[in-house]
Image: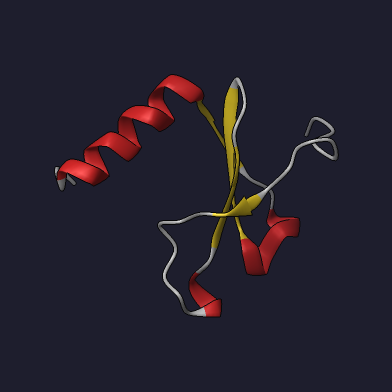
Amino acid sequence: MPDISHRKFHKSSYSSGKQENCVEVAEGAATLVRDTQNRSAGYLSVPAREWRAFLEALKRDDI
């Protein structure tokens, strides 16, 4: 895995308020997504354009 120590992760606004259901994201050329409680398991890397499309679909309630 590439070094991502310079990336700034934050809790996703789409995560529920409960501590056990948190997802963290780090935006950039690729958006990185990881489980807050299992950070050592790694992350998903999604092209920024696709991440924005996903968020827009959430807002429209398409998924």
Give the answer, above or below, for where 19 lies relative to 25: below
* Res. 62 image quadrant: top left
From the viewer's perspective, is 25 left or right of 52? Answer: right
Residue 56 location in percent, x, y? Answer: 27, 35
Residue at 25 percent of width and 45 percent of height: 58
Residue 50 location in percent, x, y? Answer: 39, 25
Give the answer, above or below, for where 32 lies relative to 40: above
Residue at 62 percent of width and 26 percent of height: 28
Residue at 63 percent of width and 52 percent of height: 10
From the viewer's perspective, is 4 left or right of 24? Answer: right
- Of 17 and 34, the residue lying toward us: 17
* Res. 51 image quadrant: top left
Give the number of callouts. Answer: 0
Give the answer, above or below, for where 49 lies relative to 55: above
Residue at 48 percent of width and 72 percent of height: 21
Q: Quadrant of the N terminus?
A: top right
Chosen colour scheme: secondary structure
Residue 9 location in percent, x, y? Answer: 68, 48
- Of 21 and 14, the residue lying toward us: 14
